[in-house]
Amino acid sequence: MTKEHAYTSRIAWTGNRGEGTRTYRGYDRTWDITTPGKPVIHCSNDPLLGGDPALPNPEDLLLATLSACHMLWYLHLASRAGIVVHAYTDNPEGIGESAPSGAGRFLRATLRPRIEMAAGADLTRADAIHHEIHHYCFIARSVNFPVGFEASYLER
């Protein structure tokens, strides 16, 4: 039996320079994400589309969210399998395309976790866990593009 979960947030455009969207270049592509009880996240559009390169954009957030969900499930499944993880970092890469109309989409994403684990860990089992995560991760189960991984391991 499945169980529904509700998530809420508030998105508020902050880029009105005084005349709204009267002209295409007359407003900023910035907004805030507010989630009840959590810090505000200041965001902007992709710099290719006039955004502020110092702020996260929707594409950054999607890729980071996909990576974080994978990491959290990896840690859970590794713990359950008796694999002790000491550190986990990822440098994911998303590849997107833009059509002449301006419509864009992700074509694929590759996660590149670097995982430090206790000496003597079963590396075959540690690697197999990545293939199980797509059964659990909300985000990976929700995107419509392929997600691959290129993991590396270090024992300590």
Image (cartoon, rainbow, N blue to C red):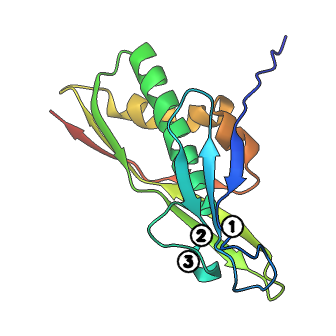
The CA span between labels 1 and 3 is 19 Å
Earlier residue among tags 1 and 3: 3
Q: Quadrant of the C terminus?
A: top left
The CA span between labels 1 and 2 is 6 Å
Say left or right for 104 vs 35.
Answer: right
Give the residue displayed 68% in from the left and 77% down from the top.
27
Mark 2 belongs to which amino acid?
Answer: Ile
The image shows residue 8, relative to residue 55, as above or below, that is: above
Image spot of residue 36 (x, y percent): 62, 29
Labels 1 & 2 near each other (Cβ < 8 A): yes
How many labels were placed on the picture?
A: 3
What number is the disc on residue 107? 1
Image spot of residue 9 (x, y percent): 69, 37
Mark 3 belongs to which amino acid?
Answer: Pro
Local secondary structure at mark 1? strand
Mark 1 belongs to which amino acid?
Answer: Leu
Say left or right for 68 vs 88.
Answer: right
Q: Where is residue 146, by image quadrant?
A: bottom right
Say left or right for 30 vs 101.
Answer: left
What number is the disc on residue 47? 3
The CA span between labels 3 and 2 is 16 Å
Q: Comparing marks 3 and 2, which lies closer to the viewer?
A: 3
The image shows residue 107, relative to residue 98, as above or below, that is: above
- On the image, numbered disc 2 is attached to which residue? 95
Depth check: give the residue in front, 126 or 95.
95
Give the residue displayed 51% in from the left and 46% down from the top.
67
Of all residues, the one furthest to the left in this rendering is 156
Q: Where is residue 28, by image quadrant?
A: bottom right
Of all residues, the one furthest to the front in this rendering is 18
Earlier residue among tags 3 and 2: 3
Image spot of residue 128 (x, y percent): 48, 34
